[in-house]
Every structure is written in structure tokens, then in C-alpha cells.
Image (tube, rainbow, N blue to C red):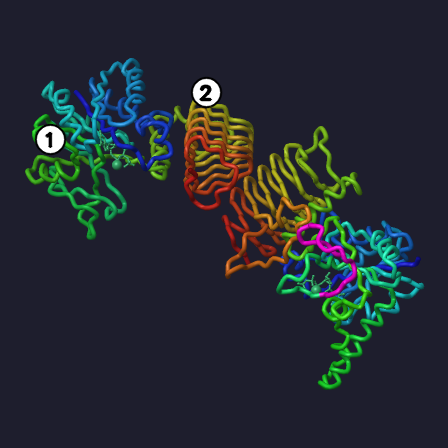
Amino acid sequence: MPLKAVILIGGPQKGTRFRPLSFEMPKPLFPVAGVPMVQHHIEACAKVPGMKEILLMGFYQPHEALSRFLVSAQQEFKIPIRYLQEYAALGTGGGIYHFRDQILSGGAEAFFVLNADVCSEFPLQEMLEFRQQHGDAHSFVILGTTVSGSAGEQRSFVQHYVEKPSTFVSEIINCGIYLFTPAIFQHIGEVFQRNQQELVLEESSNGWQRAEVIRLEQDVFTALAGRGKLYVYKTDGFWSQIKSAGSAIYASRLYLNQYSKSHPERLAQNKPGGPIIRGNVYIHPTASIDSTAVLGPNVSIGEGVTVGAGVRVRESIVLHGASLHDHTCVLNTIVGWDSTIGRWARVEGTPSDPNPNDPYAKIDSETLFRDGRLTPSITILGCSVTIPAEVVILNSIVLPHKELSRSYKNQIIL
Amino acid sequence: MRALILVGGFGTRLRPLTLSRPKPLVQFCNKAVLLHQLEALLQAGVTHVVLAVSYMSEALGAAMREQEQRLGIRISLSHEKEPLGTAGPLALARDLLAEDGEPFFVLNSDVICEFPFAALAQFHRHHGGEGSLVVTRVEEPAKYGVVVSEPDTGRICRFVEKPRVFVSNKINAGLYIFSPGILQRIQLRPTSIEKEIFPAMAQEGQLYAMELQGFWMDIGQPKDFLTGMCMYLQALRAQHPEKLHSGPGVVGNVLVDPSAKIGANCVIGPNVTIGAGVVVEDGVRIKRCTVLEGARIRSHSWLESCIVGWSCSVGQWVRMENVTVLGEDVIVNDELYLNGANVLPHKSISESVPEPRIIM
Ligand SMILES: Nc1nc2c(ncn2[C@@H]2O[C@H](COP(=O)(O)OP(=O)(O)OP(=O)(O)O)[C@@H](O)[C@H]2O)c(=O)[nH]1
Ligand SMILES: Nc1nc2c(ncn2[C@@H]2O[C@H](COP(=O)(O)OP(=O)(O)OP(=O)(O)O)[C@@H](O)[C@H]2O)c(=O)[nH]1
Ligand SMILES: [Mg+2]
Ligand SMILES: [Mg+2]
């Protein structure tokens, strides 16, 4: 069966919770477990038999890094991959409606839609099989998971859909991964028509654009629920949102864990003359690591990174070109591109993991401030930040190109 | 000559160290505080020292028998049943102090300076009054009780507690010499020499002040203990530079016991004291700290302004700062951050202490 996949990558105004890292690089390209966030999606899609094409959809201006990534991903996964740019942010449903002909071209009988900012096992094949087994071969399938991992409800068709409910309605949450047939466009089309009529009444000048802004969750699923068309396939596999930078460290952990099965070659091993590896660690082949450094668990070291003697890194992402001088200790931190940490400095954050004892616990879309105070979070160094020797940087966010001269705690440093 | 050392306080402000041993036996710059004083007294011709003790006297007694042998000096313990303050102990030890009819020294056990005992004795004989006390200049006299004295003779006119306007910047340094006559003034009951005895003596013109040259510090609390260490090491640099450690990775004034081991690629100093049998592993950075006997600092840790208690173990990549004090035999697990932690003896720390706090 000919299939397609759409990955919703958003645009520059999105991903504010990912600052200051999203200043330098579109969030979908941020490395998670050593590879760009959306590469995990692409890899999963490319594996599904019958997959003809993968479409990245968003409202980024054409972008050099993005184009380069698409070229290399096409080569690696041997599948056509294109970027479709919305003329404005059309929402999670507007873009696919606008580009419906592109999606269906080549006779696609079904297609996946995936949010870029989730990390998952992507059980796409299982979603297809589930749809076969569940009678209606034309139904739509949402990937769902439970907040707590408990068995929860057994019914699989969606009775109600409530986006971001303020009171408890269900254990099951939407993973942002869907399987649609072309029939979905009729439903989105209905919303589009309705929007248009309402706008005519309002006599808005740029009515077309606003009628095209459609949210899949609120506008389409809410209406589809209860009509027996929308099913939820519940997964027990790992899943998390990647909203804040803190969740990128958590997501890295989940993917690194998966590598032991899917990509053992990406996991660093303890070798004579190499650094000491504890747990799952990704090291880019171009990084230079002193043999007395101790890395892991859950560490990703990017391209061209230098790690000095006696350095300790745990639960952190070190981005390309960064340099960790001798005896530094980096915990629960994202070290930005080309940043430098002086010797004996300690750079530490507070993990923003969900309940660590619950393998299925889901990360909240946490916010930076609570009661007007910076909530203890991971520490983030923006790009080209310089940390002097021997200081401590604790639970802080340092914006790009800052040269610090002392210790900081619980602060955002502009 | 004879001397009485007041060693009966509980040393509460130097806890948690004083939970394991009495303050006079805590090593300051690798030598028990009391030994600094005993050795200086011996040099000034003192042959008999009375220790006025009240608590933990067994530990003190044992340590002192050893020192008697080593120094060839007589040391008596004068036991109080109840704490007698800073004057009462003189009454209790009256017989021992008055026996030879000579002036005798009295000192607080927790002050550190270049003890000027010989000069003090000479000063005392010269003016002929009943008592002499050493005074030292301080930067902020408003925080202390100050001594107002005549500029040329040194005769003390009065004492002013925490002066609001400037009257003097000299404070009592806790080192005295008295003629036996003072014993008539003191009864056998808890009495403060500073508050109850000195004011009367000053009024009668019997008390003189001699100004101290060089550094002085009351090391009765951790912060001052470390400041006093810096001063002492600086004085050592001037007088006995050969006693200080030198070599690669040593910065400024550093004192290391010969039995201590320091690993490769460490940077130690300025102002660090490393005690006997201490092991500092590779790649450690220490500044402005005292590491007491038998402790181990594991590789790549960073310590500033800390006192590491006896036999402690500080893990790898630990950062400790801001007057963190570890009591005896504390274990700090790897990769933790201790900021101003005050850790009681025999604790094992497995979580960071990001803000100053006492760990029971
Ligand atoms: N192409 C495109 N993608 C979008 C648009 N809006 C959001 N996305 C992407 O769709 C996914 C889901 O985005 P949201 O609906 O904003 O995310 P959410 O999970 O509802 O969380 P919130 O950010 O709190 O609304 C993300 O990967 C976004 O980048 C859009 O207008 N166009
Ligand atoms: N013999 C005797 N000495 C005392 C007594 N109280 C204080 N001292 C000593 O007097 C000197 C000055 O006392 P403080 O500076 O208050 O020291 P401390 O009482 O040991 O310590 P804190 O508990 O921290 O106040 C110290 O050398 C004490 O040992 C006492 O009741 N009896
Ligand atoms: Mg949404
Ligand atoms: Mg006291």
C-alpha cells in the first residue's frame, strides 16, 4: 500500500520554550541522542513498507541547515524527502489541508502525520496493523499513551476529544502521531468551509489566510470524536514531548536507551585508551576525549567537541565545537555550540524528569517560572558562552555569546 | 614562671569539630591549638602550666601527659565541677599559681598570634601594677569591647563595650600576666574576668595594656579559624619559609605534613594546610582550606574555604565552598556540591547542599 508521512516542524515563532537554543538552530534540527530531532522520525517512517515520500511541513524560510539536512537524510534513508513551506503558520491541520494534493500525489492510500517535537518509538507499523484488525479500514488512528502507564480504558474508538483539558477526562493522552486516509481532508475541509463562512460574516480583509488556519486537535478531532471514525492505538513504548530544553535531555535518554537495540554502533564502549563510559553515551567520531574523562549515563557529545583530562559529564548534551577543560564537572546541562568551560568549573542543573521510578511517566510542558521565580531547571549555556575556571553555574540559563566572570545560581543571564 | 590556660569552654562555635575533641586539641596549622601556646610559654621560661578544664578532660589529660614528656614542662590539670567562667578558674588553682610568688600568665586557649610572653613579662615588671593585658588593634572597634589606655604608660582607664563613637581600636587579646595579688580579688564561683575583675582593677590604676605586634585572631569559629590560618601561614612565610611546602602546583603559602600524599596535576593554595596522613588524589584544586589528619580528597574535586574533619572522605568531582565544615569521619559522595554545609560527625552525604545549612 502506497504511504506517505508528514512531519509538522512548526516555524521560527514556535519553540520559545526551547530558547536560547532555538536562536541558533531550528528546534527540529536540535540534536537528540546525537542526531537531529526529526531524524528519529524520518528513520521510523522510512522503515515502513510502502513509504513513498516524507514531507516536512512548516513555516521556516528556506534555510541552509535545513536543506543540507534534507539532502543528507535522503541519501542515508534512500527515500524522497521534501520541505513544504506554509506561507504563514497554518496550524497543525491547515498545512496538510493546503498541501493535500502534494500529500496524495502518487496515489497514497494512507499517510502518517507526526509532530516534530515528540520523541517516541514510533510504532507506525503497529498502527497500520491495528487499523486492519479493528474493522474499519478507513478509520483514523491516533497514537495514545497513558500518563501513568496503567492499563486504563480498554475502548479504542474515541468518544470525546478534549485538547488540554482543565479537569480530568481521561488517562489517555494524544502522542501527536496520527494515521489518516485521504478521507480526513473532507473533515478538515468542513472546518475550512465553516471558517470561511464565519469570516465572510466578519468581513475580514485577509479571510483566506485565517480560514486556512486549522488546528487538528481542537477543530478536527473534537468534531470527529463520538462518530466512530477516530480510533486510538495505545502504546506502551516510550514517548515524551520535547518542549523545553530540559526535555531534550530526557528524550536523549530514551533514544540512547533504544540504541542498544536499534543502533548499538552509536553507543560508546569502554576501550583501552578511551574515556570511561558509564551507561549510554553517544560520542561523535570527530570529538576528542581525554582517556581520564568519565562520561555517562545519558551523555551526547557533538561534533568537534574537546573534553579534557579528568572531566566528568553526566545527563548532558554537549553541542558541536564546545570545549570542556580539565577537571570540569558538567551535570544535567546543555552546553551550547562553541562554548568553553574553564578548568575545575562546575556547571550543574536540576533534572526536569518526570517521576524517575515510573518508566511511562510523561514530562510536563513545564514553564520557566513558577510564582515569579525561576524554577530549578537544567542549566543551559547558549552558543559561544565562556565559563571561567573554578566557578559554579547552577540552575541557570546563559544567553549566547556571554563571557561570565563569576559564579551564578538560579539566574537567567542576559 | 607559671601559666594558666583557660581550656574549659565548650567550644560550641567551633562545632562540629569540637564534638569530636576539645577545642584546644583541634589542630590549627597542623599543631593542636594548645601546643602553639605551650611551646611559646616554654620559650618564655615557663616551667609549669595549669590547664583549667571542665569538659572532655580525659582527652586533654592524655594528650598533656604526652606533651609533658616531649617538652619537659610540668602540666597540671585543674578540674572544675561546674564551669567557672574566665576568672573562677584562677581561684580554683590559687595554690598552684601563688606558690612561687612570681607573676603568672593567663591565656584564652583559642587565640593565635606571635605570642609575646617574654615582652609581656618585661612590660609587667617595668610598670609594677597588678596586671597586664595584651591588646590588639581591630578594623571595626564598634563590634568589640575596646580598651582605653594612656598613650605613654599603657595604663588602662576604662573598658567600653561596642563603642558607638570612636574611643579606641584596641581590644583585649586574651593574654594576661598577673602578680599573685590579683588572687585576692577572685572568689571561687563562676566569674567573668573581663566583666567583673578588670573594670575594678582599671579603676584602681592596676591594669596596663601592652600592644601586640603582628597578627592576632580568635579562632573560635570556623570562619575566623580559616582567616587565622591565612595570617599564621603568612607569618610563617616571613619567619620560617622552609616550613612551607613548595613545588609544582603549589600556589602561595601552603603547609603540608610530611606524611600526607598529594597526587598529580593538583593545584594547592594559597593558604592551605594539609594534615598528617591526608591523601589528596590527582587533579584536585584546594585553596584556603584546612584538611585535618587522615582525610582523603578524591580526584578532580574543588575545595575553597572549608575545614575537612579528621578521617573524612570527599568524593570525586565534589565542590565544597563557603565555610563548609565537615565533622570527623564524614563521607561526601561523588559529584556533590556543598555550599556552606556544616556536617556533624560520622554522616554520609548523598545529596548536594546548595545553600548553607546544618546536616544533623
Ligand atoms: N507546519 C506547521 N507545524 C506546526 C504549526 N503549529 C505547530 N506545528 C507543529 O506541530 C507540532 C505540535 O505543535 P503544537 O500544537 O503547538 O504543540 P502542542 O503539543 O499542542 O503544545 P503547545 O505548544 O503547548 O500548543 C509541533 O511539532 C509544532 O512544531 C503550524 O502552524 N504549521
Ligand atoms: N576553665 C574554664 N574555661 C572557660 C570557661 N568558659 C570559657 N573558657 C575558656 O575561655 C576562653 C574563651 O572562651 P570562649 O571564646 O567563649 O570559648 P568557648 O566558651 O570555649 O567557646 P564557645 O562555646 O564557642 O563560646 C576559651 O579558651 C575557653 O576554653 C569556663 O567556664 N571554665
Ligand atoms: Mg497543540
Ligand atoms: Mg563561650
Query: A323 or A284, which is in the foreground?
Result: A284
Q: Give the residue displayed 11% in from the left and 18% down from the top.
A: B100
Q: Which quarter of the rendering shows the C terminus of chain B? A: top left
**Which chain letter goes with mark 1?**
B
Q: As drawn, is A370 to the left or to the right of B42?
A: right
Q: Which residue is mark 1?
A: B187
Q: Is mark 1 within 8 Å of ligand 2?
A: no
- Report which quarter residue B106 is drawn in: top left
Residue that numbered label 2 is attached to: B259
Type of residue at label 2? Ser
Of residues B290 and A388, the one nearer the viewer is: B290
Residue A329: x and y in percent read 58, 40
- Callout 1: 10 Å neighbours few (<14), some, many (20+)? some
Q: Secondary structure at mark 1?
A: loop
Q: Residue furthest front?
A: A154
Highlighted range, magenta: A144-161
Seen at 74% across and 39% down, the residue is A267
Please check the rendered image and state whether residue A159 is part of the magenta-colored stretch, yes or no.
Answer: yes
Q: Characterize the local packing of mark 2: few (<14), some (14-19) or many (20 or more) Cα atoms within 10 angstroms.
A: some
Q: Secondary structure at mark 2?
A: loop
Q: Is residue A109 left or right of residue B10?
A: right
Image coordinates of residue B198 in percent, x first then y, are: 13, 37
First reached walking from the N terminus: tag 2 or tag 1: 1
Circles 2 and 1 on the same subunit: yes
Q: Where does the image place residue B290, in percent across and percent down from the top left?
A: 41, 32
Give the letter of the chain under mark 2: B
Q: Is residue B290 visible?
A: no
